[in-house]
Amino acid sequence: MARLSARQPPRLPPEFPVTLGIDADDLRDWTGSSALIEAFPKYVAGVCAQGKEGDQSGPQATPTRRGGTPSCQGDGYVLGNEGGQPYAGWHWGNRGAVTSAAIEKPHRSGWRPLLECEFDLAYTPLMELDYGQGRLIVCTLDLEDHVALDPAARRMAGRIMDYALHSPLSPRASKVVYLGGEGGAAWLDRIGVSYQRSDALSAGAALLLIGPDAKIDASALRAYLEAGGKAFFLPRSQADGPLGARSSRPQPLSPDRCRCPIGPKPGA
């Protein structure tokens, strides 16, 4: 979870229902102050994520860049980074915040970010998960503190409610089948995919995962796809792909194309 308040606009996905009619200016510098996190924290040479002496179980209990693990000396933020800077930078006041608890986007899950923000767009204040026949929505925008004061916050709250009530559901595939060898199975396990293994194409599969070494009848695959089935082909190195597809390796760039132009020397 981000350890600072975001006042600048999150990245808006193009033409997405939840942000329809919302622009970047609607998601920045909201009127009022947020109350979720401490507005004026104490800066001490230690870490105290839970406010208890010696407790280093929280997210800030990390070694400093200069080596060693800081000790807890009361409520505050870590000092001891380069130049004596506190962890996640200085924080002073919550006025104008849009979100105080943006969540780092899960790396291996079905959560889908609806808004993105912070460094490298690695965090989200609004995301959804298709679960069973329904949907979960997690919102960490500071709506409670600003919806009564800022018309843009009130408008965003209305869009989220309307999206939750009326947006069409997209249930997950009920049966995912993998065709292929151990290499592809290990790749799927590593990224957290749930699937069933099979030696033959299953007409009842909602999604078919096809490994690079899978032996599958092209006519049966074509019939499965024409009947509404969905297939995903795992990365492969073979030139000849399924259903007549062909792939080729990209040509490396020549040194001349990678050479940077040389400008005049200073003072010349």
Image (cartoon, grey):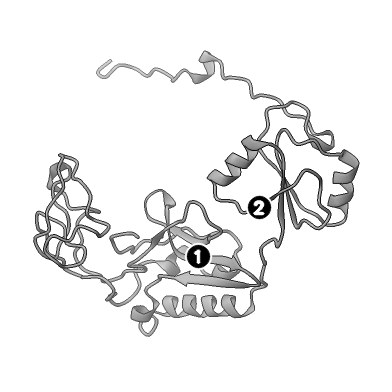
Q: Residue at x 53, y 61 (%)?
A: 111
Tell me residue 166's x, y (percent). 64, 78
Image quarter where the N terminus lies is bottom left
Q: Tag 2, which secondary structure?
A: loop
Tell me residue 161's x, y (percent). 53, 80
Mark earlier in primary sequence (1, 2): 1
Q: Residue at x 53, y 56 (%)?
A: 109
User: What type is the residue that disc 2 sits on?
Assistant: Tyr
The reply to whether callout 1 and callout 2 are in contact (CB within 8 Å) is no
173, 201: nearer the viewer: 201
Tell me residue 126's x, y (percent). 47, 66
Tell me residue 132's x, y (percent). 63, 69
Q: Which residue is mark 1?
A: 127
Position of residue 72 relative to residue 163, above or below, is: above
Q: Residues within 10 Å of mark 1 (few under 14, many from 20)?
A: some
Q: Residue at x 49, y 20 (%)?
A: 258
1, 61: nearer the viewer: 61
Q: Residue at x 66, y 63 (%)?
A: 172
Please give left or right for residue 43 compared with residue 257 in the image.
left
Quadrant in the picture for residue 71: bottom left
User: What type is the residue that disc 1 sits on?
Assistant: Met
Image quarter where the C terminus lies is top left
Count of marks overlaid on the render = 2
The CA span between labels 1 and 2 is 24 Å
Label number found at residue 195: 2
Which mark's residue is nearer the viewer, 1 or 2?
A: 2
Quadrant in the picture for residue 34: bottom left
Please give left or right for residue 105 compared with residue 87 in the image.
right
Q: Tag 1, which secondary structure?
A: strand
